[in-house]
Image (cartoon, helix red, strand yellow):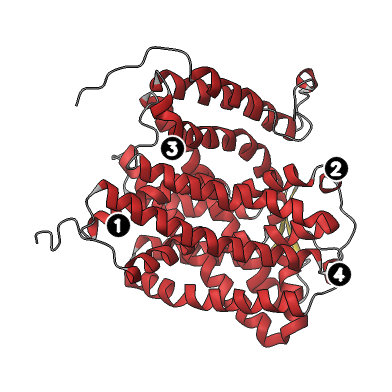
Amino acid sequence: MGLLVQNKQMSFSDTLSLGFMTFAFFLGAGNLIFPPFAGMLAGENMPLAMLGFLVTAVGMPLVGLIAVAKTQGKVMAYLPAFAATALAVSIYIIIGPAFAAPRTGLVAYEIGAKPFLGDTSAVWMLGSISLNVSQLLCTLGFFALTMLLALFPGKLMDSVGKVLTPVLMILLMVLALSVVFLPGGETGIPQGDYAASPLIKGVIEGYNTMDTLASLMFGMLIIDLLRKKGVNEPAAQTKALVRAALIAASGLAFVYVSLFFLGATAGDIATGAENGGQILTRYVDREFGTMGAVMLAAVVSLACLTTAVGLVSACSDYFNELFPSIKYRQFVVLFSVICAVVANVGLTQLIAISIPVLLSVYPVVIALVAATFLTERFPNPELSHRAVLAVALLFGAIDGLKAAGVDMSAFAFMPLYNEGMAWLLPTLATMVVCLFIGSRKVEAA
């Protein structure tokens, strides 16, 4: 079969469809659990915390997609091969078996199963390790199904996705309107870091969505889809991807703002909640009754499943290319088993464990995206990219180790050290210096 259309132009409906698909890529159901909890903790400081969250949970993924479009998918082109591979491997592990994929199973359990199971306190003891019985059985079943769907991909996932995304959007719109007209209570007193520095705390909380990391991978996937549709001109691809990114960002912002308001005005229903999934479930149960809770549980569980299958499949594809001697299906089984094991850490604990890792890796990805937009202005792009990312990695590691409990007080003199963003000013300073060092290379046509 030859190409049906060469350099095809995207119609308005094509662009809209691509935008909603991009939105569906990013809105893993796990993203629904962070804004309500952050809104509850921020209380009266919710507007500033929400603004910070939107910067890293909406703004940075949008910019990341545009950076991928700008470089035609070669966003790591100026890095040494080993460094580019190491960064890509890190991102795939984080958004795959280490954190994001196991989190889908935990969110499905918290929202889709736990509210209907009655007493969920029973535990099994394996030596000194205690395992919650209901959580263990649910996550084992969830990732067994994930494995089967990833092993035998077909049109089922596409069909579920096409039905699921509109239904999820309708539910979220109803939820957003109810938050405005049926607030749970008055906003509370800011807690913890949300009292002292709500904006920066919101920025760091946005790391938890992992969407900036995913944007580099999703951008390349979208470019590949555009090529398959006959959109081959780089300018046309960039235009389509930027428009899709704007549609997706608008949808994400709408969802996050409404969920922040839900958390901030949750009142008594948030008492004792350990994560945003519990707040969301309690609110829906109170305002919409059992039927609303069942609908939310069903749609979120399916959304979690499609996200998990997508993540396991993407990771298996990537590592199969990296290690061709190991088959795709073997990676699927391996990653599904790892996800099931990691998931039984528990949602609250998994989020806590992921924070030091994200504080270390996120600065590198943000620096990479920023450097991409300055490439034409750098006299020596290769040197500049490497220097900027090295500084971001070094100082990001300081923030990550501090969050992990390592004594890093020797660096306490640094600006934004206490807020967990010691990497920011050194990285910005390195970018500025790189604008003036080196001789500009004349590239061959």
Q: Is residue 387 visible?
A: yes
Spatial CA span between label 3 and label 4: 42 Å
Q: Quadrant of the rendered structure where residue 137 is? A: bottom right
Q: Nearer the viewer, mark 3 or mark 4?
A: 4
Secondary structure under tag 2 reads helix
Left or right of 177? Residue 316 is left
Q: Which residue is mark 2?
A: 196
> Which of marks 1 and 3 precedes in the sequence?
3
> Which of marks 2 and 3 precedes in the sequence?
3
Q: Which residue is mark 4?
A: 267
> Which of marks 4 and 2 precedes in the sequence?
2
Relative image position of residue 407 (x, y in whole percent)? 78, 24
Relative image position of residue 445 (x, y in whole percent)? 19, 27
Left or right of 314? Residue 41 is right
Who is closer to the viewer here, 146 or 445? 445
Left or right of 216? Residue 415 is right
Q: Nearer the viewer, mark 2 or mark 1?
A: 2
Who is closer to the viewer here, 111 or 177? 177
Taking the spot 71% from the left edge, 79% from the top edge, the residue there is: 178
The answer to whether the residues at label 4 and label 1 have Cβ atoms under 8 Å apart is: no
Secondary structure under tag 4 reads helix
Residue furthest to the left: 2
